[in-house]
Amino acid sequence: MSAKKEIKISFKVFKIDTVAFSYEEPEDIKPILDNKELGVHLELVMNVKDDENNKGHQLISVIVSSEFYDKESKSTYIKHKGKTVFLVKGLEKTDKKSNQYKLPVDLIYTTYSVSFSHARALLANETSNTVFKNYFLPLIDPAVFVKDAEITTNK
């Protein structure tokens, strides 16, 4: 029986930012003011790269893209991209020559979950002075995104 190697990974939130936001009010805003149910499209993208300023550290960025749209007309009313960057220490490369990292599933869950929470708050802030102030990203289980995660690494 072989002993499992203990991996110690530490990370912290490094930066939180809205990288894109736009909205368009419909001609008839009454349904919006009455909290008409809108469709929501979500996408999460994760990127891992070495931190040039902190040797032995990596930066994991997660961008949460969201769109709110009218389910009948398919018109898009809100587009938002929120980005959370984590400073990470302790990731292992898949091999010495590559620039790809082994990402523990728990780390992926945590970074997706925290990033999605940040995106919810960023979007709420952006829409607070609009007719869409009562529209929020739904609460989700990050497992929905983790099972289909496409993880890329950059040098």
Image: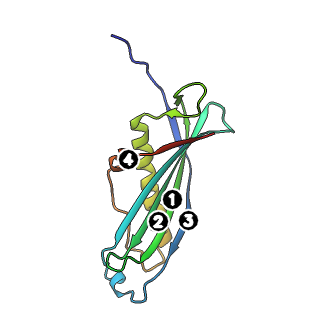
Lower sequence index among marks 2 and 3: 3
Q: Which residue is mark 3?
A: 20
Q: Secondary structure at mark 3?
A: strand
Splitting the image into 4 quarters, where does residue 50 fall? top right
The residues bearing labels 3 and 4 have C-alpha atoms spaced at a distance of: 24 Å
User: What amino acid type is highlighted by mark number 1?
Assistant: Gly
Residue extending furthest right?
Answer: 53
Of tags 3 and 4, which is closer to the observer? Answer: 4
Q: Which residue is mark 1?
A: 82
Of tags 2 and 4, which is closer to the observer? Answer: 4
The residues bearing labels 1 and 3 have C-alpha atoms spaced at a distance of: 7 Å
Q: Which mark is residue 148?
A: 4
Task: Find out whether the residues at labels 2 and 1 contact each other: C-beta distance under 8 Å.
Answer: yes
Q: Which mark is residue 29?
A: none
Q: Nearer the viewer, residue 145 or 15?
A: 145
Q: Nearer the viewer, residue 46 or 13?
A: 46
